């Protein structure tokens, strides 16, 4: 299991894909008079603008590609604008590929480090992002998770979806880190897993019954989950336990909006 004390060089720079699209029929967005959720105002600015400001103040961040409608006032914060392709993985694919260097400029054997994040985590700060990126292990795919205790300490009363593992109870982060050169290798397999998530038999066949049963009963350890996910996707996958609750706290309902307003000083 990777923790926040992992010794990793801090000077690495990461390009970033911000997923700022969304369902045009999202009732939460419609209730607040905007086209998509990342444009919902939080503390006087679209929530996506808070995210972009945090990225631009983070020294480890390089270029930023934004998928979806860029929020007003954020034009200078975005290097590449990418059209929303209508699905999460589709947007990941086009966003990451928009950032890839021409083949003649790539360094053989050197990872193309990209952070993919949603635009609905307005409480994230530059220091949190720096801390996370400095702690990131070298792997093809890294997924941050936050302990339930950290979420509830930072935001008392917050409601999140948690998974109970042998190592503790966690919620997933709203970003992940990857090597862009491997996207074409693992995205098709990830699509297959997501397509099977509502078909228990098919999902069990992909994951394996022993692993699935241990997961459902809270007996699966993080290192076992990492090994299984790595095997399924064909790339080295690692979890990164982060203490920063904002990374696992997105805004998708009015209770979350109230929490964010309070956290950002305008509650």
Image (cartoon, grey):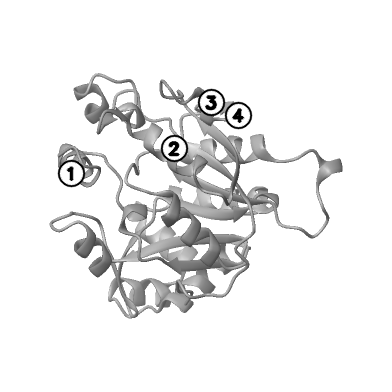
Instruction: Find numbered disc 4 in the image and state the secondary structure of the residue it sits on.
Output: strand
Q: Neighbour class for label 3 at 10 Å: few (<14), some, many (≥20)?
A: few
Q: Neighbour class for label 1 at 10 Å: few (<14), some, many (≥20)?
A: some
Side of 168 relative to 190 (left or right) = left
Q: Neighbour class for label 2 at 10 Å: few (<14), some, many (≥20)?
A: some
As drawn, the residue found furthest toward the right would be 104
Q: Which residue is mark 1?
A: 262
Q: Quadrant of residue 219?
A: bottom left
The residue drawn where x is 44% and y is 49% is 126
Residue 64 image position (x, y, % from top left): 57, 37
Instruction: Find numbered disc 3 in the image and state the secondary structure of the residue it sits on.
Output: helix
Q: Which residue is mark 3?
A: 76
Residue nearer the viewer, 10 or 180: 10
Q: Quadrant of residue 12?
A: bottom right
Residue nearer the viewer, 98 or 218: 98
> Mark 4, mark 2: which one is toward the viewer?
2
Instruction: Find numbered disc 1 in the image and state the secondary structure of the residue it sits on.
Output: helix
- Please tell me whether residue 30 is drawn above or below residue 162 in the rendered image: above
Q: Which residue is mark 4?
A: 80
Side of 173 relative to 78 (left or right) = left
Side of 244 relative to 184 (left or right) = left
- Please tell me whether residue 85 is drawn above or below residue 111 in the rendered image: above
Mark 1 → mark 3, Cα distance in angstroms? 27 Å
Q: Which residue is mark 2?
A: 53
Mark 4 → mark 2, Cα distance in angstroms? 15 Å
- Please tell me whether residue 122 is drawn above or below residue 192 in the rendered image: above
Mark 3 → mark 2, Cα distance in angstroms? 10 Å
The residue drawn where x is 38% and y is 30% is 22
Residue 116 image position (x, y, % from top left): 51, 46
Marks 4/2 in contact by CB < 8 Å: the verdict is no
């Amino acid at each position: 299991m990777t923790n926040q004390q992992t010794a990793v060089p801090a000077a690495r720079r990461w390009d970033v894909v911000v997923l700022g699209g969304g369902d045009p029929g999202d009732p939460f967005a419609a209730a607040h008079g905007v086209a998509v959720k990342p444009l919902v105002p939080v503390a006087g600015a679209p929530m996506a603008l808070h995210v972009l400001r945090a990225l631009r103040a983070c020294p480890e961040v390089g270029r930023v590609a934004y998928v979806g409608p860029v929020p007003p006032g954020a034009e200078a914060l975005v290097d590449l604008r990418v059209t929303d392709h209508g699905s999460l993985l589709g947007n990941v694919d086009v966003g990451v590929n928009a950032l890839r260097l021409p083949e003649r400029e790539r360094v053989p054997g050197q990872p193309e480090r990209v952070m993919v994040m949603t635009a609905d985590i307005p409480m994230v700060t530059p220091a949190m992002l720096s801390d996370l990126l400095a702690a990131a292990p070298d792997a093809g795919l890294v997924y941050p998770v936050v302990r339930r205790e950290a979420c509830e300490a930072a935001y008392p009363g917050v409601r999140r979806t948690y998974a109970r593992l042998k190592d503790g109870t966690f919620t997933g982060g709203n970003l992940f880190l990857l090597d862009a050169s491997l996207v074409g290798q693992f995205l098709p397999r990830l699509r297959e897993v997501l397509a099977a998530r509502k078909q228990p038999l098919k999902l069990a066949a992909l994951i394996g019954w022993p692993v699935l049963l241990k997961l459902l009963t809270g007996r699966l350890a993080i290192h076992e989950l990492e090994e299984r996910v790595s095997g399924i996707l064909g790339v080295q996958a690692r979890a990164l336990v982060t203490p920063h609750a904002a990374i696992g706290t997105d805004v998708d309902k009015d209770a979350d909006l109230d929490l964010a307003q309070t956290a950002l000083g305008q509650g």
